[in-house]
Image (cartoon, rainbow, N blue to C red):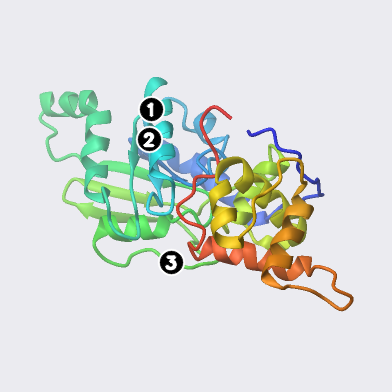
């Protein structure tokens, strides 16, 4: 991760239904041929569950890099090369627009071509391919599933963890999906991971202090996309300023002041995060492969 002088905070996040989802996933893995892990193209590192590779064992995995319409296309290419160099198949997709959704099943069949050939040699030509779809909450999993099925079969919502239960979804005559609730590990690897999840709404921002979250986010913008600060907030971010100082400069430029002329940090924090969510800062990828 980037070496940026972040402000620290305490984080508590122990949702009980995540533990149940993990258990369901372990029980269901024996039923499937391939695991598809959906990641958020804006935060490919933070949006992955570090336990998935251990739990899937020798099941083939296809990484689906979702929301590429919101990410930096140049950095998306960096991530694709990064995984391909490790022999990990990855497909950039967009559940919202349907981009590359029709390539998922063919890519899955390529992954298990040896198994399919073995079935054919035994005369089992009609055997159903079963795929497990995995992803942390609010990574766009339900939208991708609905695109694959060409109908609304999975609940879609803008709040984390809207999917509940387990269901088989028929895609075509030879393919079924096992939809499972998005799962998130009960403790974070680092504060940065928690903040990236909060910034992109994978977890509720209420879990963290919004002013500290925004201060650290604007530091990341200075590191990766300083032009976004210059263009949107009309100041050149000083290299030696901390996050709260940058937030203060933005607040003053916007005229967000409280009585006495002090900056309104809370209002500026909400504005910064809201404008990022609304795409007003441009397409961004907040993590790079070699950070």
Is residue 51 positioned above or below 103 on the image? above
Q: Which one is in front, 189 or 59?
A: 189
- Mark 3 residue element: loop
**What quarter of the picture does the N terminus occupy?**
top right
**How far from the left and from the top, in percent, is residue 237?**
67, 49
In contact (CB < 8 Å): disc 2 and disc 1: yes
Residue in the image at 82% along x and 49% along y:
10
Residue 219 x %, y %? 68, 46
Mark 3 nearby-residue class (10 Å; few <14, some 14–19, many ≥20): some
Is residue 214 toward the left or the right of residue 147 in the image? right
Which quadrant would the C terminus be assigned to in this image? top right
Residue in the image at 69% along x and 33% along y? 3
Q: Crowding at label 2, few (<14), some or many (≥20) Cα neighbours within 10 Å?
A: few
Mark 2: secondary structure: helix
* Left or right: residue 259 compared with residue 264: right
So how many labels did they put on this image? Answer: 3
Residue at the disc numbered 1: 81
Residue at 65 percent across and 61 percent down: it is: 204
Contact between marks 3 and 1 (CB within 8 A): the answer is no
Q: Is residue 160 visible?
A: no
Between disc 3 and disc 1, whose residue precedes?
1
Residue to which mark 2 is pinned: 77
């Amino acid at each position: 991760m980037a070496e940026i002088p972040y402000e620290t905070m305490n984080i508590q996040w122990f949702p009980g239904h995540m533990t149940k989802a993990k258990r369901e996933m372990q029980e269901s893995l024996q039923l499937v041929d391939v695991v598809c892990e959906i990641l958020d193209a804006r935060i490919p590192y933070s949006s992955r569950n570090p336990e998935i590779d251990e739990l899937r064992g020798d099941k083939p995995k296809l990484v689906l890099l979702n929301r590429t319409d919101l990410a930096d296309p140049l950095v998306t290419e960096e991530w694709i090369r990064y995984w391909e160099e490790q022999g990990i198949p990855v497909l950039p997709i967009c559940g919202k627009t349907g981009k590359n959704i029709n390539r998922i099943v063919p890519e899955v069949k390529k992954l298990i071509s040896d198994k399919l050939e073995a079935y054919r040699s035994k005369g089992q030509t009609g055997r159903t391919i079963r795929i497990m779809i995995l992803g942390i909450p609010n990574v766009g999993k339900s939208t991708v599933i609905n695109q694959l099925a060409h109908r609304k079969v999975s609940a879609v919502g803008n709040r984390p963890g809207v999917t509940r239960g387990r269901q088989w979804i028929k895609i075509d005559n030879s393919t079924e999906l096992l939809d499972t609730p998005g799962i998130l590990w009960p403790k974070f690897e680092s504060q940065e991971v928690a903040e990236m999840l909060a910034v992109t709404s994978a977890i509720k921002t209420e879990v963290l202090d919004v002013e500290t979250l925004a201060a650290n986010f604007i530091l990341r913008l200075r590191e990766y996309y300083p032009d976004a600060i210059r263009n949107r907030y009309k100041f050149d971010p000083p290299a030696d300023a901390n996050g709260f100082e940058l937030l203060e400069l933005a607040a003053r430029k916007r005229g967000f002041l409280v009585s006495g002329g002090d900056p309104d940090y809370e209002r500026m924090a909400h504005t910064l995060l809201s404008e990022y969510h609304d795409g007003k800062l441009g397409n961004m990828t907040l993590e790079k492969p070699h950070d």
